[in-house]
Image (cartoon, helix red, strand yellow):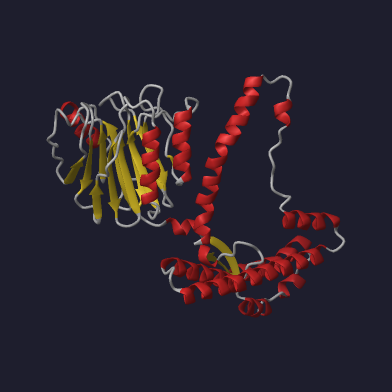
Amino acid sequence: MLPTTSSYISILSQNIRSIGANFSGLLTLMERIEASCDIVVLSECWLSRYPTTPVINGYDSYKTRYYNQNDGVIVYVKKSLTKVKVNEPDVLDCNCLIITVGSDLAIIALYRPYAFSDPSNFIQLMDRTLSDLKSYRNIVLVGDINIDIASGCRTSHSLDYLDLLSHHGLFPGHVIPTHGHTCYDHMNLKTTMLAKVLVLETTLTDHFAVLLAISRNSSKNKNLSLVTKTDEEQLQTDLTNIDFGPIYNTDDPNLATSLFIDPIISAIKNNTKLISLSRRRRPLKAWITPGLLRCMRHRDRLYKLSKKEPSNEVLLISYKRYRNFCTNILRQAKQSYERAEFSKAGKNSKQLWNVIQSVTNLAKSKSSANDLLDPNRSHSQTINEVNSYFIRIGRQLAVTMFTLVPLLI
């Protein structure tokens, strides 16, 4: 079940197909799912026929301009949701509202009419919009986009659209069909929070509704690693106080072994505890010490300050000198670590080879092209696999950067 507690922000998206005809059905849907949605996004509202926005108790409403008969996006925001700002950018080929909640969450509510068969203008618009919102760590792009992203049904347009989103760190929350066999109703996410998406098979219109819950709390606790720490002084005291006398009073070797081992294991457990090590204190590499981490972060702070004050030559020179100093220290630390690893390996050929692979990055897995040479494969299969491989490269790089960038902050 989708979490809808106060620790989550929930967003419901529905193609309404005329706000006047189907509004009562929307209220019924909200009651049936038993979810007190914080934000409700309605698309294809036919605002040309129904310019008056219906009222939902406890919600503020916002709407877009309209140009065609079926145009219009309406967004309902719960009054209890604080630090909310809503604006409508000047756009082409779609209706758009941007809702920001504080300084950490931005929601782009969209309706792109099906009549615009070529999404090129829309994709360019999304590129500019997402660039303007890059300071937000959490972005949700939601609405009836009329671009099919269902698995196995993607075209060059949908791939261009998905590649653009992945370039900005957004990925589909679902690819389940929402209109027949097509996935037109999207819930694309860029987030460091816990999130869950459900597709609701409603009969309100021929489009299914999409429901999202995104955590309000930072997921930093998910980025902690656990390390064991032993109080060696207390352990030594406890081992000294162990009475091993019963061992000499038994003739059973198994019992004697237990009497010897069990107190030692118990003493170790009692003096060992798990400590959460935050990402900020966790070394990225084995040879990076806490001191080097502080050095790297000071370098990054100087870089940000120099970018904010590009005319400050003293600050720029200070940054460059410290950057060079930090680079030299990191290089020396890495070289010293690698020499030590080679020394540890000694004449053990297996360990030596493992060190060589680690130092030269030969241990990284590489994809083989042997399958492409299989005579039993058709030319079309081979071509499709090659195209699929290169299409995925941008998305995979975006996923990698999405994972690694927080580690460098």
The quadrant in which the N terminus is found is top left
Can residue 31 be seen from the camera position used here? Answer: yes
Q: Residue at x 68, y 70 (%)?
A: 333
Q: Residue at x 60, y 67 (%)?
A: 269
Above or below for 397 versus 293: above
Residue 201 place in picture, x, y as percent: 33, 28
Give 221 or 373, whichever is nearer the viewer: 373
Above or below for 76 versus 286: above
Residue 237 place in picture, x, y as percent: 64, 80
Q: Which residue is drawn at 40% across and 52% down?
A: 134
Above or below for 246 versus 379: below
Q: In which quarter of the image is residue 244?
A: bottom right
Q: Which residue is drawn at 14% across and 30% down?
A: 50
| Left or right position of 281 against 114 | right
Give 253 or 47, whichever is nearer the viewer: 47
Residue 114 place in picture, x, y as percent: 32, 26
Can residue 37 be seen from the camera position used here? Answer: no
